Image (spheres, coloured by chain):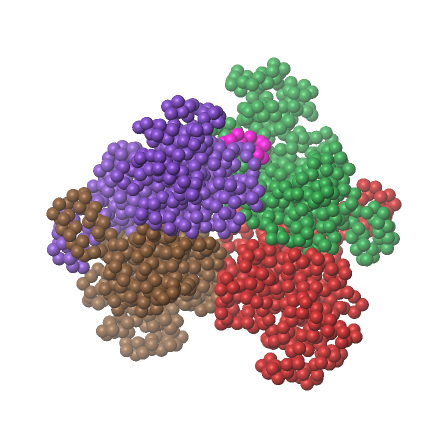
Chain colours: A red, B green, C brown, D purple
């Protein structure tokens, strides 16, 4: 095996993802899995130093040739062959507990460090290696559901990824209609909140001067945003996602823009599950917009309320907010929002119920029930307003009878809010939201 | 303390190194050190999540304001306050050694993980944070000489840096006269083998078509090469560094270039001590040159032999190679190389002595004495040739009586050579060098 | 009117095309046309020097607000107000013809220079000005059909554009799936030979490693290619556009690529009519591919034969090539290519007819009838082969009964071929094509 | 002659200036000049179309091989062989003056267009061609002094360059310590007002946050600024160039910067003589700084007054301003500025004399005597203040006894000032300068 002319070909030209795309050949008479295992062992051996990058490249190529069953077996191999040796660990931990010397600590540390992490680091040396590892973990996370014993392998992935995807290594970049198609097609693929239905739809979200988009990128995954947020510049705090996404909407004169609305925020890589970027992204976008668009006065989300509908209809809860069975029947009609004027009290009741839901805790816990509220309030935002008829799409009605919520980000209050929320479990509310909640609290006894 | 308008100012415009350059003010009535300690604690606290980047930025600013004494005290603080709690560790390691369950393992792991690494990761979130941490370790390495008890702090730095500066995150870039001055001034600062004496000298090494330079960069340290190698394209394997660096030398027609000579390779950041890039850099430069300059046939170094002179003059060793005391006196004259023809036998003797030195082992070990030989032979290169009168500078004569050596890199033989060297301790030699060494081995009995 | 804060806003951020996109307001009580004329006069006046860029920006904004009728009137204004003053010109030409002194020449030159060119140069100073001028000429070219008296205005456009779009100012860039969407959507818009039906279709032409695309760009029109060529890497000279464009085609291993096929070349900007880029583009793509893909042996087109069908069916010409009326009826069926095996003689006849057509001259002229042949043969290529059933699309059958042709580019023969063609009117043919043509020439008497 | 593998090598890699740097070989038995003439003729011939770029490349290479005498002969060749044919021109101008028809106009136009311009356009197609042409004109301008008959050749250069270097094709770029060394070394070379003495001096002018530099670039001359301006951010309008350039000066906190001072503006390419960029550059820098540094309140120059000393000492003019012969003797001492307090009246007199000089007209003309004043007042600036002891360098004392002047740019007044100056010959003055001038005007009778 030699370092041939194409040794680093992955670095040049078209082959930017060679490690993940290439379909090479397995050495004769070997299954990909056998070859894969052998290369992993080789990668950690003395030889590794001389031909590490090439072997790492092979690992990724061969992994891609493996069937799902082979991949599962590969993860089991990683679990058993590259973990912490139990007997050895029992021995050195006993020694240390008896004599906690520096040397015994060093021994303990050495045995504790799983060879898997070292293996992953060497796999990362190949061009395209980081993406290949993220994809590997994507597979693993699926296997974990049926093979929870693989958890220790995932812990090593997660530990490394948290170190590698440290905020300090990410760059925030605007995404526009001027961005490469290879990046843009990923927005289409990863937008999970309000589906992007076509390239035309995408262009409407990126190209007009009153629409912006920002993402975090990692230098090794240049074509793939890690997380992105879509922003609409508005005159006032918006109360309807339909208005924002309408194909024929009027474009706002930038002089009149007063509010930046974050109307969709999406993580892109399932293989980075458990690493949190959203908090950082929102705050940096706010900070940047304050510099580039000094005319903006408010930074607000227009957020869905997943789970609200289910919460409301269970346990006769609806009735407590004045929503009758016939109201519920009405709300489940696909055209209810066209006739809502005949049921004005329903709108009022939905707002009351929504604030109750958004501030509801999990049983025997201070933890909020609703995950989106948890995220934004945990970031230091406050609940600013609630809108009925705000998302009349199928998904919107199925989640929350179409109700949406604004969370407001005021940079100067973020720390105070965050601390009150994290330490004293207090929820920041605008004055109207505070009034609405007080009214409910008075009228009800512990919903 | 709030996230003000200038929250991320470090990201924009001139302030690219704000974390390391800014000289802010310490809160009233506080020494920088007090403020620094407080911020470190805050950074790991709950508050940290909301205002982490700002606090991290403060940490770096305040650290820069600290005196050397305060910095030393800070590292002691890191040692004692953010290490592994001994009592706790004794407890959980005892528990695990008694009952090696998954839960007890998790406990052990948790206690093992030092909070320092987590602290460093959070410090890294600030713009300029990575460079600031590298500079911090530069300080620490100096303190270590007198305060070896700080070693555990350094181990955490080293562990993190090895993960962050993984080969997979580095990019190789050519450096040319077209590179930013801010990068070029670092070449001048870091060139340690053959000093760059002026911007004119630098231009002579970068601008002519037969001169090249490559470096590894890390995305977060964009202005600072981690390591760089200077390359001269030649007709034949060169035997004199004077010829390569001569201000008035003729420029080689690229059609006639047959040999790429690596005549200087330098690490730039002392704070990255213990992380090795040289091996990877040389191999990738060879691979790249094979693609961009297919006319090149050989890849070779022209390397110094530090320590050769000292080795030769000690213990009457010189005499054994036929170098008399009067020869030595002659060699120590600053102008000996102008009169060398009168002492032809000296040239021959020096070559013999040099091959003996380059292949000499440390006492009771297979490890080579000469560090440069160790590096290149460990990379899989072979000793190709030895040249007397090759470096007539003060440094060259002080190191090795002006003798230099070529190491040859043949990509196809690198793995074999490396394995023979690493496993069987065999030294790869060209045929003439092999002959030279055989002659000495026969004539001597265990020099 | 003052240079306000937003004086150069067109240069920054989103507003890259502000000159062409902005819809400003006309000063009160003025039609856009009035305002436009006034600004043109101002632009050439003394004031112009101080506020030229701002006035030029206004010109483009106001022009965009004008109706078609107003634009036509504007061009008439340009014709009459900024042309050469006839009386003055008669006077100075008379003077010069009587006394051809240096001073009289200078006077003549001054009067000859139309103020329009100067006006256009000043319009060009605005950000986005070059594109705005190209768009202006696009309008003018439409008006010219009904208002041929505007021709002198167009001559000034053409003269300036030829100077500005000199080959030396163009850069050739690869276009890939990594290119900005704003560029790619223009490929979709401008592909006129083989329509791009969707972003998926576009991706199939750009992303696979055996597909390439190159374009000329001008620095001032960065988002808009001037001309682009689509290239397929193939094993052999291809004989069917269907195979090249098939959605499910196998991707060629680059090691096996021997032929680069230019299967579509398109001009993008109608406003640059009369300025020729194709010749330069093809030759530079060939030169670049020879460097980046040294494995390629041949550079060939797969070109349409527009006009062939019309030529063949007129004047009983078909019969002379052995194509009967019933054959023609058969050929006009949309599914004829599925049954072609029953009409083998038709294929043969079509090939003969095609070579006759491709080499046919215009009446009383050496000029070839077919414009595509004229272009490639004029560039120094040769006719390499002819393929029946090569383009079975509606357009392909309508143009040429589906027949296509390969032109071969051999850099070493380009000059010779070009000169033979340009000076001696000789057509370069491959041996088989030469044989085919000889056979026809013998059998026919002056088709 | 064929299009070889290296056909476009000038486009890639190091050879960016190949056209101007390469020293090729002349075909056997030919002088470079013969070869050059032959290629020029070929470039305009039919062959040109097929091999134009290669021939153009040859032209530039051969020109570079020519001696000064050969170059002069070459320009004479351009004058006689590629100009307007006199006889023909007499003929067609006569025809047109008799019958001013469209056809006769076209004929006249065709004969008027000199083939030289067409030749230059074709020379421009070569990589590096634009720079080569600029260098060619640099030579020509030197020859013009002794061979004024070459003027028509220069007119064609100038005409083309004015079209090519239209403001619309230039980009303004900041120059910083982060700029390529190849650009920075040109600042050192072209700074003519206040010499840059070393790379350290250069760094002091570029790197501190209170120092900026901007330049115009043309896309084809990417490494060479056309014109650059050095800017110092200051607290107040500065009155001394020594303070600005002092190596150990304190760096201004950006929060305190209120004034942007343009203290040096330099044209770089002598070959572009007669094309004016300064006016545009200053105004765009002002506009940009207003956006990026909104804290700046004033935009001002600190300008030299070349010619002031000569003007003052001639014709007993000094006496009229109260400067005695002994004062003049004192002023000519190199250390006068250290003892100026003993000659306070001299400072006052110099200020009066300076305002008189700056506003003095040329004999029988409205044109100002001082070219720098003409430039800035023509741009719409006003004379803001005059400083004695402002430039104590040799050059400063030799030009103007060390006196300097501030011109103030107020964007809102530029148009008004410019028009008043251009049309009514009024000079804009600050109130104190107005008062100073009034005083002189009263006390003197037509100095």
Q: Position of residue D28 (x, y in %)?
A: 29, 36
Residue furthest top as drawn: B326
- Quadrant of residue D187 within the rendered picture: top left
Left or right side of D146 for D220: right
User: Looking at the image, can residue A314 be seen?
Assistant: yes
The magenta stretch is B188-205
Nearer-the-camera pick, B261 or B70: B70
Q: Is residue D164 left or right of residue D286?
A: left
Q: Is residue C253 magenta?
A: no
Residue B163 appears in the rendering: no
Location of residue B51 with respect to D385 vertically, above or below:
below
Q: Per the image, is B195 magenta? A: yes
Where is residue D146 shown, x and y percent of the image?
Answer: 25, 33
Q: Is residue A176 left or right of residue C126?
A: right
Residue shown at 63%/57% (left/top)? A283
- Residue pictured at 28% horizontal, 56% vertical: C116
Q: How many marks?
A: 0
In the rendered image, the vertical position of residue C117 relative to residue B86, given as above or below: below
Foreground: A51 or D316? Answer: D316
Image point (24%, 40%), residue name = D151
Residue at point 45%, 60% (across, down)? C183
- Horizontal and vertical percent position of residue C159: 28, 55
Q: Percent x, y for residue B91?
A: 86, 50
Answer above or below: position of B186 versus C125.
above
Seen from the viewer's position, the closer of residues A92 and A276 is A276
């Amino acid at each position: 095996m030699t370092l041939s002319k194409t040794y680093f070909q992955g670095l040049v030209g078209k082959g930017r993802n060679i490690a993940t795309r290439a379909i090479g050949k397995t050495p004769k008479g070997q299954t990909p899995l056998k070859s894969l295992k052998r290369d992993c062992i080789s990668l950690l051996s003395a030889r590794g130093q001389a031909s590490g990058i090439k072997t790492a490249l092979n690992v990724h190529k061969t992994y891609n040739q493996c069937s799902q069953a082979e991949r599962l077996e590969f993860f089991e191999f990683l679990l058993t062959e590259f973990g912490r040796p139990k007997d050895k660990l029992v021995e050195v931990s006993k020694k240390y507990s008896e004599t906690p010397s520096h040397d015994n600590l060093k021994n303990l540390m050495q045995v504790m460090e799983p060879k898997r992490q070292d293996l992953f680091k060497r796999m990362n040396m190949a061009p395209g290696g980081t993406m290949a590892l993220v994809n590997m973990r994507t597979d693993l996370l699926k296997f974990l559901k049926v093979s929870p014993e693989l958890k220790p392998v995932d812990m090593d992935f997660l530990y490394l990824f948290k170190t590698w995807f440290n905020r300090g290594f990410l760059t925030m970049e605007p995404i526009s209609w001027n961005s490469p198609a290879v990046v843009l097609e990923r927005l289409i693929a990863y937008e999970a909140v309000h589906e992007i239905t076509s390239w035309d739809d995408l262009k409407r979200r990126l190209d007009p001067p009153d629409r912006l988009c920002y993402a975090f990128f990692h230098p090794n995954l240049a074509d793939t945003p890690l997380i992105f947020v879509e922003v609409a510049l508005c005159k006032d705090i918006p109360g309807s996602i339909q208005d924002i996404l309408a194909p024929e909407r009027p474009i706002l004169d930038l002089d009149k823009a007063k509010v930046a609305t974050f109307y969709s925020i999406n993580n892109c890589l399932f293989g980075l599950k458990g690493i949190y970027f959203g908090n950082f992204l929102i705050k940096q976008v706010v900070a940047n917009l304050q510099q580039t668009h000094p005319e903006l006065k408010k930074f607000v989300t227009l957020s869905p309320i997943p789970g609200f509908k289910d919460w409301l209809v269970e346990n006769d809860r609806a009735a407590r907010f004045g929503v009758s069975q016939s109201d519920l029947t009405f709300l489940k009609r696909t055209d209810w929002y066209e006739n809502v004027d005949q049921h004005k009290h329903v709108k009022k009741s939905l707002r009351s119920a929504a604030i109750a839901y958004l501030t509801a805790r999990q049983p025997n816990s201070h933890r909020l029930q609703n995950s989106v509220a948890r995220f934004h309030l945990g970031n230091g935002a406050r609940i600013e307003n609630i809108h009925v008829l705000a998302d009349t799409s199928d998904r919107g009605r199925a989640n929350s009878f179409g109700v949406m919520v604004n969370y407001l980000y005021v940079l100067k209050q973020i720390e105070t809010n965050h601390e009150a929320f994290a330490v004293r479990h207090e929820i920041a509310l605008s004055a109207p939201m505070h009034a609405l909640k007080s009214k409910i609290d008075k009228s009800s006894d512990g919903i």
